[in-house]
Image (cartoon, helix red, strand yellow):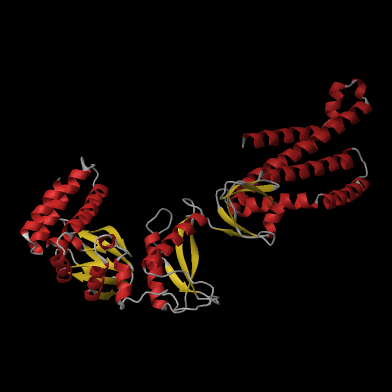
Amino acid sequence: MASLLVRAALFSILALASLNIDQIASLFSSEGAVSNSVLLGQFLHSLTWFAGAFLAISLIELFLWRGMVARIARHPVPALLKHTVALIVLVIAAACVLSFVFKRDVTAIWATSGVLGLVLGFALRSMIQDVFTGIALNLDGSIKEGDWISLHHRDFLNEQYGKVLDIGWRVSRVQLEDNNVVVVPNGLLGTMAVTNFAHADHISRLQVEIVLDFDVPPDRARRILLASAKAAANGEGILKEPAPLVLIGDPQTYGTSYIVRFWGKLDERSPSSLKDAALDRVLKHLYAAGLSPALPKEDVYFERKPKRLLNHRDIADRVSVLSRTQLFSNTLESSELVDLASSINVRDFAAEQSVVLQGDHGQSLFVVAEGFLDAYVTNGDGVLRKVGHITAGEVFGEMSMLTGEARSATVTASTEVVVYEVERTDFQHILDKRPDVAKIVSQIVARRQAANVEASTVEQVVNVQDHEVALTKRILESMTKVFSLKQKASVSTVQSMQS
């Protein structure tokens, strides 16, 4: 504002001086020489024109750049645009000085400059396009520094993900995920398709695609994939809300395409990193369910086709699922796994349905074959709090079944769930034949419980090994009572464990 007032005052003084040039000339020349008056007049008139030009530049800066344009663009106007407009104003002022002060014909000058401008414009058309595209990008704000974008161009083999470092007057710099910096001419950036993942909250929807065999039922595929997406939403960057979604895509020649959609924060992780985290969970859940991505159907079979889809009603497939769990994988022999798989119940639960309730005296444990569950604990003040998640391939409810203790948490299905229920009587048959299984099971359960306690408490356990041994002893003693194990066997097991 101070600069504007100074320029306005200077313009006013020079304008008044130009209007009274004769009186001013008489003060500095003897006998009012005409030549001195003319020279002084030309000088003052020229200064007045240029002072007016600088005043006009200040007015444009105040009312146009900082006022109307700044409100529309919502960020500062590029300096290049300001300088270009200022140069045009000064050129117009110079032309007016030549025409009105020195009485010169400027038509030839305008014609010559027009031809020269055409020649230069044609020669520098790419650079001019880059400059004005850079100005447009800065003004409209469609792409800003710090935005994650994807570049689509016919010369690229694949779309390129990158973070915008800056948008200059001629080029823009984009840092790719491999930390290489790509310098893109603004003219090219303005003509290619650009996906901008960043908004005001930097939350964007992403998706990964997986193809499964045609014989996989759609409801089962949706259940497994939705569970994997919800499991991935517990990591950094992938959001729980809005909730993930699974859609059926276009059929492929070798299977059905499924699209897993989720939302992520692009200011925390890159798009490829978020997709990698989601796809990692998808593949792990498929493996736990005995599924794999579809293969091209070009196999030539000369023997029975290998099984690619587990059937939870089939004994052999149940054995396959049980053998992948930590509790049974190195505990039971093959014949014992077969006996256990023959007696267990396969149960289906709908989303939001409770599988076990806190405080109940459970008679069974559960093996998650498919799905995703949440664990809740009710505090002393009656507030329900989520404490963890249970996913495919994991076991829950074993403490209540083995020791007779009440359920320590309420477990609710977050998606549709398929679980194997192993009742206490089923496990009793195994312990009757081989009591030493009790020691192995108690050690595994104690190790899991000790790890959970250490992870959930703020204070570190002083001696994890001693805590685990004490917990194993307590579990084994409870199992001795619950399953009526032979006293001799249990005593010898405890003594060997302590040694």
Can you give x and y, in whole percent of width and height, for residue 284 in the image?
40, 62
Q: Residue at x 15, y 62 (%)?
A: 402
Q: Can you say which quadrant of the picture contains the C terminus?
A: top left
Nearer the observer, 217 or 275: 217
Nearer the observer, 243 or 45: 243
State left or right for residue 359 relative to residue 184. left
Can you give x and y, in whole percent of width and height, for residue 341 in the image?
25, 73
Q: Residue at x 53, y 75 (%)?
A: 299
Can you give x and y, in whole percent of width and height, for residue 74 in the image?
57, 51
State left or right for residue 181 relative to residue 478. right
- Please, which residue is most extreme toward the left here? 487
Q: Is residue 240 above or below residue 298?
A: above
Q: Residue at x 41, y 78 (%)?
A: 217
Q: Is residue 493 visible?
A: yes
Q: Is residue 407 visible?
A: no
Q: Is residue 21 above or below residue 114?
A: above
Q: Can you say which quadrant of the picture contains the N terminus?
A: top right
Quadrant of res 239: bottom left
Nearer the observer, 23 or 286: 286
Q: Is residue 436 above or below residue 345?
A: above
Nearer the observer, 489 or 229: 489
Can you give x and y, in whole percent of width and height, for residue 12 in the image?
73, 35
